[in-house]
């Protein structure tokens, strides 16, 4: 059995006044930084300026924050309907990862589209790093004990004994009596690592552009749908939680898309296609200049 007795805040009011930084918040910041830096370094290999990635990242982060908060508020509307002012209080905690993923994609893709950057290429660049970045942020969830889970009487069960941990408010009990529960976030991290390995293996072998990102969404949806059965979040209907239904919608969109459009190719063929595309682009640019 594993007991975690770490304060959920990395910095609290006793150290730096009223400014509070949770482990989850700090590691989420590190996760976003890692993702942006890695994609920025990979972009020139696809003929994309790193500065374009950094500009896109700003809008992706904004979209991610809005989406993450929106998903959380919808799932907990019974709390926020009596105090709408708290909806904007992101600093007080409360985000949904599904909203962060989808909102981040919408924000980044929208900016990239209007800035005339290749949305599919950039999305595919981000796909392998996202499960890794999510796992970094999820380590903060483990330390904080932010997710309620079903009880588990096995050697890898986890409990949180710090009285400030959100886990002590779970249905399983209080700080001193809480049962050991499924390490649902550890499950998710393991699934993320497996997904990252698959995406990395296929990063130069699946076409057309955007299909690798679609595969990332499908993989995450499968894992999240399964793992959520071990969590104790609000049940919406038919014994399923909000994350279940978001995962189902994502799968309904991505699976037919992958079946209809995705195709596998060798690295040699892919390089040939990329060269041909660049040549066509160069010729088109020359014709525009000649006019």
Image (cartoon, rainbow, N blue to C red):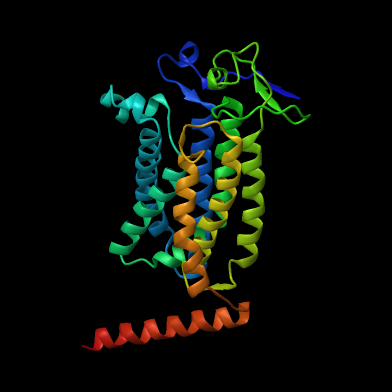
Identify the image quadrant of residue 267.
bottom right
Q: What percent of the width, then of the height, locates residue 205?
A: 59, 73
Question: Which residue is at 41% across, 44% downward?
Answer: 99
Determine whether, in the image, residue 262 is placed left or right of residue 19: right
Question: Which residue is at 36% across, 33% downward?
Answer: 73
In this orientation, does residue 78 appear?
yes
Q: What percent of the width, then of the height, locates residue 273?
A: 51, 82
In this orientation, does residue 40 appear?
no
Q: What percent of the width, then of the height, locates residue 150?
A: 62, 29
Residue 140 vertical position relative to residue 5 in the rendered view, above or below: below
Determine whether, in the image, residue 62 is placed left or right of residue 4: left
Front-lying residue, 283 or 222: 222
Question: Which residue is at 69% across, 23% downward?
Answer: 180
Identify the image quadrant of residue 155.
top right
Front-lying residue, 250 or 136: 250
Question: Which residue is at 28% across, 22% downward?
Answer: 83
Residue 105 vertical position relative to residue 115 in the rendered view, above or below: above
**Dividing the image into 4 quarters, which one contains the N terminus?**
top right
Pick out the residue farthest to the right. 155
Q: What percent of the width, then of the height, locates residue 158?
A: 69, 26
Front-lying residue, 257 or 232: 232
């Amino acid at each position: 059995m594993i007991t975690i007795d770490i304060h959920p805040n990395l910095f609290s009011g006793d150290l730096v006044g009223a400014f509070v930084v949770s482990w989850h918040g700090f590691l989420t910041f590190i996760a976003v930084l890692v993702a942006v830096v890695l994609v920025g370094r990979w972009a020139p290999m696809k003929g994309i300026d790193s500065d374009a990635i950094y500009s896109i990242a700003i809008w992706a982060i904004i979209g991610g924050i809005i989406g993450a908060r929106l998903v959380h508020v919808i799932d907990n509307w019974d709390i926020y309907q009596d105090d709408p002012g708290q909806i904007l209080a992101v600093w007080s905690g409360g985000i949904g990862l599904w909203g962060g993923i989808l909102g981040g994609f919408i924000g980044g893709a929208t900016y990239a589209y209007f800035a005339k950057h290749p949305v599919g290429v950039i999305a595919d660049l981000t796909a392998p790093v996202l499960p890794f970045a999510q796992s970094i942020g999820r380590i903060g969830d483990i330390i904080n004990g932010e997710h309620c889970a079903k009880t588990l009487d096995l050697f890898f069960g986890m409990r949180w004994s710090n009285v400030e941990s959100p886990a002590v408010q779970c249905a399983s009990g209080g700080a001193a009596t809480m049962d050991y529960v499924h390490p649902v976030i550890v499950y998710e991290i393991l699934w993320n690592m497996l997904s990252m390995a698959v995406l990395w293996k296929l990063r130069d072998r699946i076409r057309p552009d955007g299909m690798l990102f679609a595969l990332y969404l499908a993989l995450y949806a499968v894992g999240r749908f399964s793992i959520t059965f071990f969590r104790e979040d609000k049940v919406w209907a038919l014994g399923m939680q909000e994350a279940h239904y978001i995962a189902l919608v994502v799968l309904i969109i991505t699976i037919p898309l992958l079946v209809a459009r995705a195709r596998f190719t060798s690295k040699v063929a892919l390089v040939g296609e990329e060269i041909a595309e660049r040549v066509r682009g160069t010729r088109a640019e020359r014709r525009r200049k000649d006019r």
